[in-house]
Amino acid sequence: MNKKPRGKRPQDNKRGYKTLIFVIILMFFGLFAISSYTGGTEELESVSFSEVIRRANDGEISKIEVEGDDLTITEEGNDEPTQESRKESGSSIYEQGLENRDVEVEVVKPDNSGAIWRDLAIGLLPVFIIGGLLFWMMRSAQGQGNQAMSFGRSKARLYGNEKEKVTFKDIAGSNEAKEDLEEIVQFLKFPKKFEGVGARIPKGMLLVGPPGTGKTMLARAVAGEANVPFFSISGSEFVEMFVGVGASRVRDLFAKAKKNSPCIIFVDEIDAVGRRRGSGMGGGHDEREQTLNQILVEMDGFEQGVNVIVLAATNRADVLDPALLRPGRFDRRVNITLPDRKDREAILKVHYKKKPLEKNVDLDALAAKTAGTSGADLANIANESAIVAAKHNRKTITQTDVTQAFEKVAIGPERKGKVMSEKEKELTAYHEAGHAIVGHVLPDSDDVHKVTIIPRGGTGGVTWFIPPEDKSYHSIVEYKDILARMLGGRIAEEVIYGADRVTTGAGNDLQKAAELAREMITNQGMGKKLRNQVFQVDDGMIMDKMMHERQYSDETAKIIDDEVEALISEAAKRAHEVIVANRKKLEELKDELLEKETVEDADVKKIFDGTVLPKSATLY
């Protein structure tokens, strides 16, 4: 989203002009004083007065110009003065010895204007320099005073004067959220229609969704649709180290909004200031809590007929204070979810609209592969594909560019420069083949998309699984198949090299498997002994977490550990059964990886044609 650049204020321009004029005046006086000392005609030869009288009486001088006590001498045969001298004060040149009356003596009235200006410049220059220093010091002190006075003012940025405003047409997907927000647009555009039937305009709406789903863009679109001003601020911009500043900024923000009503106030990441009070962090005088209290007061204090609506965005609605969510404050909640396949395709078309695509680029296939990605991720893929095309000096984006960009964003860039020994390559090939064959054989696992032994990101190789369709729910058997394929790499190393020869290459796999197993037991109620029980609730109470690490007994903790261990052991056993039963196919994929380094999904399916699922590895 392009933001309109903020121009300089008129006061800043006036101050700049005044400062420039002042500097020019100082430079003028300085240059004038210097020129008064260094300027003037060409220097003449200085001679003694007695020499002048002697030569004049001898007829060697034709003209003497007298200006006060200064003499300018023109020698015989010359038209311009060649020498200068000085006589004694108090008497004429004749009284001091000039006898030759043929010498032309011209008395000139002294011109003191140059001396006056010189003395004036010399006298005023220090005054201007000292005055300029005092003026600069006063301006600096005034600027600091202004900053201190504006410290409690809101830092919200005002939008609404842009020529190209964001509307709902500019945002692909999120149709349900748009329908909910359309009511806000109608309230802002036609308030009397609702007031006529006694409907109360909602004061606040909370946009809840994962990062990158377009919450800020939707808020801008509401303002664009209603054609009203839009104040945007982050929750963290309210809070400062000084107590009371946040509350002051809240008051200033709502005062500005009332003057510009109807308008929208958008508070991004409101959980930075709206967390539940009473958590014990900072006590009752916590600056964050005072800021939250002021927000609650201001939202209650809206006068009737003031069309100011507060939109707030967060991805942690569970930690917000209940007072924020009660009716009369944030009356509505709009859940913005990750886009489905249809929405992903529409979002990709928007981001590729102004990019030159070749006709064979399949955005629908790309949308199918990108399950679970946000709008921001899709925008990043589109941008990366354009970068790849530019790096290869292409003027259009090809299907290869799009694929490379997708893989770079999803699993990280290739590190072809990393040197691996033949032994490491073989071990990596067995490891990735183990993941692939377990994931392929088990019925509730996702499809294998690509297998590579080229290091990508922080991994030595990658086995990439992509679900065939979008999923909102996961079953126990599906999670168990995922656990088994996570352990497939480690189990393949055990089968090939022996249990004592396993390596650290499976460290990340084991960590993710342990996290998933514990998630199943503690948060999803999928244990055998602890079925339908949840033991870990994240309610945002930081101090409560610090003082009470768990909300269950030691006996229950032991059962949870046993359940997690049982899931991991079962997954390892199933992976072992699959790999042993399909050892030949494992070797075939290993050989293919050593030869080509990367094997695509179609080739993987050909190699795995004829694999079997052992009865000992089935769950039903």
Image (cartoon, rainbow, N blue to C red):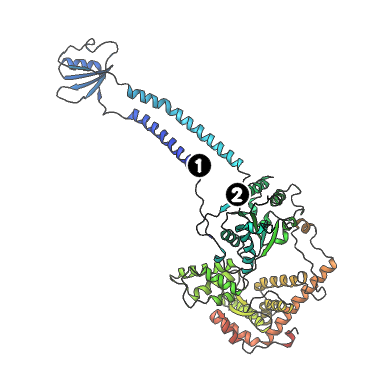
Q: In the rendered view of the protein, which quadrant contains the C terminus?
A: bottom right
Name above or below for residue 80 compared with residue 403: above
What x and y, as percent, mark residue 416?
53, 72
Secondary-structure class at tag 1: helix
User: Which residue carries the number 1 mark?
Assistant: 11
Give neighbour class at mark 1: few <14, some 14-19, many 20+ (Cα, 10 Å).
Answer: few
Residue extending farthest to the bottom is 610
Q: Position of residue 603 (x, y in %)?
A: 57, 84
Work out whether residue 421 or residue 603 is closer to the camera in this orientation and state it.
603
Q: Quadrant of residue 560?
A: bottom right
Res. 72 in view:
yes
For label 2, the residue is: 155
Q: Earlier in the sequence, mark 2 or mark 1?
A: 1
Above or below for 306 versus 417: above
Residue pictured at 67% horizontal, 84% vertical: 441
Question: What amino acid does circle 1 point to?
Answer: Gln
The residue that appears at 59% across and 79% down in the rendered structure is: 449
Camera-nearest residue between 144 and 299? 299
> Amino acid type of disc 2?
Lys
Q: Is residue 591 visible?
A: no
Q: What secondary structure is found at the residue carrying circle 2?
A: loop
Residue lying farthest to the front in this orientation = 196
Q: CA distance from mark 2 to mark 1?
A: 19 Å
Q: How many marks?
A: 2
Asked where in the image residue 372 lies, by quadrant, the reply is: bottom right
Left or right, 530 with reference to 25: right
| Horizontal arrangement in the rendering, residue 582 relative to residue 61 (left or right) | right
